[in-house]
Image (spheres, rainbow, N blue to C red):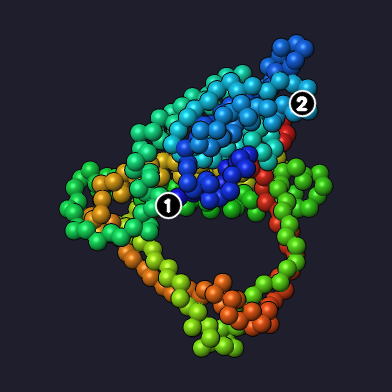
């Protein structure tokens, strides 16, 4: 039900393969100088899926590299992507590029691995609940309501408290992001603080214009059923202090550092919320609600089946095209390629 950001996955599997098997191995790789034996403080945090051997990743990274790359730590688990994504986000301030390499000097590597071990244990302990949580919005919830109690009320209140913190965190991140973009602008001196992506101009089907011109044909192809279940909380969370983060007088680097700190906090909130929501769903089972606390609501709608429409009306599809202009997007980077 929840997802912060996609992690950086160096696997070559297709999305279909990823859905079939979420298990795998989380690895920590480190470079060693062939001549001196010196270990470097750059650590790669990545994954291999299923029963694939981590050694295959080692060989790939050694190609053309004058330094030896070896796996120094690894963890096997049922949901490897979830943990990798969390670590990449929680320790974004230590990531040195858009990939999976982190600068972890001294005791920092030990700290990161200890966090990984703790989160690994939590995933193992909650694996069945998380598996059920992942499909909850597509599962019917028509069982008899169950009575609330003080423990369930405390659980729901904790979830709502974290949701409020998550919302506050999101607003803070947006404020810092806007301030950083406004201050650094397009200055070449600060491009390393941003990730820049671009999309080429393209043509796409203008469904709104087509629906207006040919409503009867459009309705004929509204045949795809969208059915979703959503939790509705029946009590409200206490309001939080809406004090804005201090950004006045901060330099671009200080703003970016603040942005990554907020990013890290978001990762921790997401993790805790995911586990608590899975716990709540476990208590609910197939029940439609916990009386006075939370209830499932169902929505169903018919969607336009574009693939079927194209098969039967390719000429019309080609006629109702609109140009989407090229676009450049500049956002604060989720890594820190500068001295900390």
Mark 1 surroundings within 10 Å by alpha-carbon count, few (fewer than 14), some (14 through 19), many (20 or more) = few
Q: Is residue 198 in view from this perspective? A: yes
- Residue 49 at what x, y percent from top left? 53, 37
Packing grade of label 2 (10 A; few <14, some 14-19, many >=20) is few
Q: Out of 194 and 56, give the one closest to the viewer.
A: 56
Query: Is residue 282 shown above or below 90?
Result: below
Q: Is residue 170 above or below residue 310?
A: above
Where does the image place residue 324, in percent across and percent down from the top left?
Answer: 71, 70
Mark 1 or mark 2, which has the lower sequence index? 1
Outermost residue, right direction?
A: 188
Q: Position of residue 307 (x, y in %)?
A: 56, 72
Q: Which residue is mark 1?
A: 1
Work out whether residue 333 or residue 176 is closer to the camera in this orientation and state it. Answer: 333
What secondary structure is found at the residue carrying circle 1?
A: loop
**Image quadrant in which the C terminus is located:** top right
Front: mark 1 or 2: 2
- Residue 119 position (above or below residue 245): above
Residue annotated with mark 2 = 65
**Side (left or right) of 251 relative to 212:** right
């Amino acid at each position: 039900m929840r997802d912060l950001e996609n992690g950086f996955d160096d696997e070559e599997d297709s999305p279909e393969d990823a859905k079939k098997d979420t298990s795998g191995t989380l690895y920590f790789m480190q470079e060693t100088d062939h001549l001196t034996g010196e270990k470097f403080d750059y650590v790669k945090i990545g994954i291999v899926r299923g029963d694939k051997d981590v050694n295959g990743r080692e060989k790939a990274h050694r190609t053309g590299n004058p330094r030896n790359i070896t796996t120094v730590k690894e963890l096997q688990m049922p949901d490897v992507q979830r943990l990798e994504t969390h670590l990449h986000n929680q320790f974004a301030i230590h990531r040195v590029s858009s990939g999976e390499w982190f600068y972890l000097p001294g005791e920092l590597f030990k700290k990161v691995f200890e966090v990984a071990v703790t989160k690994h244990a939590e995933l193992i302990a909650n694996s069945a609940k998380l598996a059920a949580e992942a499909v909850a919005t597509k599962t019917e919830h028509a069982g008899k309501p169950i009575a609330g109690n003080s423990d369930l009320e405390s659980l729901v209140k904790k979830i709502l408290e974290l949701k409020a913190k998550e919302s506050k965190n999101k607003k803070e991140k947006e404020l810092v992001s806007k301030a950083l973009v406004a201050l650094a602008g397009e200055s070449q001196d600060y491009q390393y603080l941003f990730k820049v992506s671009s999309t080429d101009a393209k043509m796409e089907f203008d469904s709104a214009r087509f629906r207006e011109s040919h409503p009867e044909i459009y309705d004929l192809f509204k045949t795809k059923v969208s059915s979703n279940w959503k939790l509705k909380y029946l009590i409200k969370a206490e309001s939080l202090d809406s004090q804005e983060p201090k950004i006045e007088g901060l330099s671009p680097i200080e703003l970016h550092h603040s942005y990554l700190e907020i990013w890290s906090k978001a990762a921790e909130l997401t993790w805790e919320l995911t586990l608590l929501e899975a716990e709540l769903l476990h208590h609910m089972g197939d029940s439609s609600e916990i009386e006075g606390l939370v209830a499932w609501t169902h929505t169903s709608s018919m969607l336009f089946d574009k693939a079927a429409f194209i098969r039967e009306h390719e000429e019309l599809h080609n006629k109702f095209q609109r140009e989407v202009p090229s676009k450049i997007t500049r956002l604060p980077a989720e890594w820190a390629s500068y001295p900390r």
